[in-house]
Amino acid sequence: MQKKLTITLDEKVYEGLHRTIGARKISRFVEDLVRPHVVHPDLESAYAEMADDTRREKEALEWAESTFKDVTHEKA
């Protein structure tokens, strides 16, 4: 669900946003900037979702195994 928010900006900031980002893209731009600072992810469910991705898990395991093999042959 989205909520409408009215904010006040310096005129030069607004003009810069309008010129650089575009008239209909400012809300998304601001949301993308603000979100990481105010919405904290549910890490447990995010990790569970990643673990359910079997292709990704297979690639990660293969990478980890190949890296481990490289390290075991190095001299201290």
Image (spheres, helix red, strand yellow):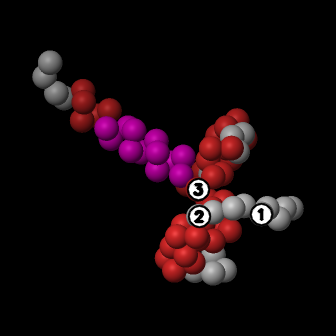
| Three-letter residue code for mark 3 | Leu
Judged left or right of residue 42, residue 13 is left
Q: Indicate the position of residue 30 as horizontal and vertical percent values.
A: 63, 62
Residues packed near mark 2 inside 10 Å, few (<14), some (14 to 19) or many (20 plus): few
Q: Which of the 4 image quarters holds residue 25?
A: bottom right
Q: Quadrant of the C terminus?
A: top left
**Whole-Å distance between the Cαs marked 3 and 1?**
17 Å
Name the residue beneath numbered marker 2.
10
Predominant SS along the magenta part: helix
Q: Nearer the viewer, mark 3 or mark 1?
A: 1
**Circle 2 SS class:** loop
- Between 10 and 74, the residue placed more toward the observer is 10
Name the residue beneath numbered marker 1.
6
User: Magenta segment range?
Assistant: 56-67
Q: Which numbered dot is residue 33?
A: 3
Judged left or right of residue 18, residue 8 is right
